[in-house]
Image: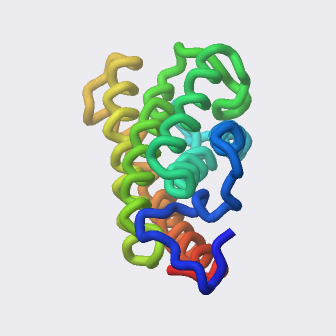
Amino acid sequence: MATASTPVPSRAVLADLLPAAGTRFGAQARDLVLVAGGAALTGLAAQLSVNVPGSPVPVTGQTFAALLVGTALGTRRGVASLGLYLLAGMAGVPWFAEGSSGWSMPSLGYAIGFVLAAGLVGALARRGADRSPARTAVAMVLGSLAIYAVGVPYLAFALDVPMARAAELGLYPYLVGDALKAALAAGALPLAWKLLGRR
């Protein structure tokens, strides 16, 4: 782990501060554990779920978890982690919202969007976007927009409704919650860097 006297590259993400593996195999094994752990964390957070009346899209913790995983792991590992979450859930692992799985649910587009968002926030974190509250909040907002950019059109297609109706069902009711999640991340991620002694 990096110490206060060890400079941390500006392109580092939080996962890079873990102790370095001594071998290539060790590094690959560590990456696999991080990828699987990020997918499991997202699946666990998905079980924190509250139904929204009239909408097939519940409020869950998985969006927040997906953005944190992408930010902490960086682009490559973040995409792999959320890709694993998506593919395993589609294959039958019951870790989508409310213990669901499969590929026929109208809200699947949001899980697809998690992969895109993880790549985006991971790339931003590599540029230091998670080291100050303002930049972290911007990264979280952009990540949320990436999720909606896939989730809302997918919802419109799955339900055979106009985009405006899909936005009413799967976008507008969630904006306040997303703002709160962005604010929470804006406090938590820079604090993590500060506690680790580096910015």
Which of 136/123 is in front? 123
Query: Residue 39: horizontal and vertical position, in percent?
Result: 65, 38
Would you say residue 26 is visible in this rendering? yes
Residue at point 53%, 76% (across, down)? 190
Residue at point 62%, 85% (across, down)? 4
Left or right: 139 in relation to 53? left
The coloring applied to the image is rainbow
| In the image, residue 188 above or below residue 181 | below
Q: From the image, which quarter does the N terminus lie in?
A: bottom right
Left or right: 173 in relation to 38? left
Residue at point 26%, 36% (across, down)? 164
Query: Residue 161: horizontal and vertical position, in percent?
Result: 31, 22
| In the image, residue 176 above or below residue 81 | below
| In the image, residue 194 above or below residue 52 | below
Would you say residue 55 is visible in this rendering? no
Which of 130/183 is in front? 130
